[in-house]
Amino acid sequence: MLWYKAWLETRLRFLISLCGIVFLSSYFVFRQNHQALKIPGHPEWYYHTLHNGHGLIAVMWLLAVILLTMGGLLREKAIGTSSFTLALPVSRAHLMRVRILSSFIQAMALVIIPWGIMFLVAIATGLPNSFTQALFHAVLLAGGGSVFFALAVLTSSAIEGEYTAPAVCFGLVFADIIAMGGGRFQAYSPWAFISGAEYFNRATGRLTGPIPWVHVIGNVLLAALLTAIAIRVVQKRDF
């Protein structure tokens, strides 16, 4: 029942986000590859197009995830329905875990499905692309994005207000992009990691080197820590 409740709360936002990301990213790649066919002899164009499509997915994914994670017990408290949820014979921690896992599954679906469809469109409308490159990009988005996902969960668990919490989260994301997206702090920026700035070769349009699994695991562990803090905050909160 808790899983179904979590799905009902987020299904409209998820489905709108999924349709929007799939359509815009696939249409972008289709248009770019269609133009490239008129200029033969530049195979690197297709990899540039795929990388730019990844950037488009990443931006829309961030927006979608922040909206997906907003709500929960704090929103129910604001509208006066939290007492019904808290009356269920389960702990607050269990309520939070179900909602977080449900949102996380949806967030990962927003990585895999749009990227898979965009990759198929890229193959159908241009030269063959490398599956390894597609996997590299998707891993970067899922790994670095997990930090932003957890940050959004923590924000929605600590700050009341249907619009205040997402506004604060958007502010934190922009702060990371502006302050840490380049220069000496780039290696510590989740956004720079998502965009693949450290691994991107402009001459070929490809990401170079092996997939940075150590960095991915580091991001996932940081996300797990932020999520645990969010659950603890809700457990201690007075409803």
Image (tube, rainbow, N blue to C red):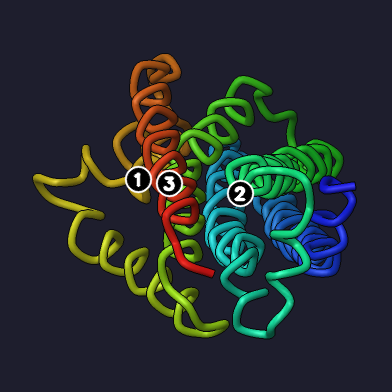
* Outermost residue, left side: 184
Q: Earlier in the sequence, mark 1 or mark 2?
A: 2
Toward the viewer: 232 or 209?
A: 232
Give the image location of residue 163, x and y in percent.
Answer: 53, 85
Q: Which residue is mark 1?
A: 190
| Numbered circle sitting on residue 29 | none
Seen in the picture, residue 12 relative to 50 is either above or below; the reply is below
Separation of disc 1 and disc 2 at Cα?
A: 29 Å
Splitting the image into 4 quarters, where does residue 225 fall? top left
Q: Position of residue 60 (x, y in %)?
A: 60, 63
- The residue labelled by disc 2 is 92
Query: Is residue 24 or residue 174 the one in the foreground?
Result: 174
Residue at x-position 85% and y-position 69%: 12
In depth, the one of 159 and 170 nearer the eye is 159
Q: Which residue is mark 3?
A: 232
Q: Residue at x 68, y 48 (%)?
A: 95
* Amino acid type, residue under disc 1 in the picture: Pro
Gap in angstroms between the C-alphas marked 1 and 3: 24 Å
Q: Is residue 163 visible?
A: yes
Which is nearer the N-term, disc 1 or disc 3?
A: 1
| Number of residues whose C-alpha sits closer than 10 Å to that of mark 3, classed few (under 14), some (14–19) or many (20 or more) | some
The answer to which of marks 3 and 2 sits earlier in the sequence is: 2
